[in-house]
Image (cartoon, grey):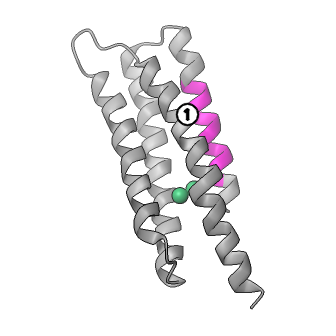
Amino acid sequence: MIDNDHAVIHTLVRDLCSSASRALAPKESKGIFSEIIRKLEEHFRDEEEVMSRHEYPDAHAHRSAHSAILKLFREGRESLIAPNGKLSVAILERGEVILSRHVDKFDFELTYFLRCKESE
Ligand SMILES: [Fe+2]
Ligand SMILES: [Fe+2]
């Protein structure tokens, strides 16, 4: 489930990056941003629920990382509301990098922890 979510979110971010280069209308871009944020909120909630249930020792740092990612994407969406609002390609590119790093580090460690617990 977690890996499937990652793939869906990654595709949405990619789509938004490519639409940035097609100069998509701010309203349309905002809709895609909102979709990404909604998926991230849902996904982070699920992961955080799993961490609480399993008393995951690194939960605090992992939750903080989720908050930072959400903040970044919310800022990206807000920047589109400005009168001259253009899709912030820099924020998107940063978001894409930060998300993949998060999956490679925090989510990888969580998955590893859960696998070790399962095999106990
Ligand atoms: Fe994740
Ligand atoms: Fe995570």
Query: Is residue 60 found left or right of 85 in the rendered image?
Result: right
- Look at the image and tell me in which quarter the C terminus lies: bottom right
Residue 41, by quadrant, is: bottom left
- Pinpoint residue 19: horizontal percent, then vertical percent: 55, 17
Query: Is residue 15 found left or right of 82 in the rendered image?
Result: right
The residue labelled by disc 1 is: 96
User: Magenta region: which residues?
Assistant: 5-16
Which residue shows up at 55% across the image and 42% down it? Answer: 99
Instruction: Please say whether residue 11 is one of the residues in the magenta stretch.
Output: yes
Name the residue type under label 1: Glu
Instruction: Please say whether residue 114 is one of the residues in the magenta stretch.
Output: no
Residue 81, by quadrant, is: top left
Which residue shows up at 65% across the image and 75% down it? Answer: 113
Query: Is residue 12 found left or right of 58 in the rendered image?
Result: right
Q: Is residue 98 above or below residue 39?
A: above
- Pinpoint residue 107: horizontal percent, then vertical percent: 60, 59
Label 1: which secondary element: helix
Ligand 1 within 8 Å, label 1 CB: no
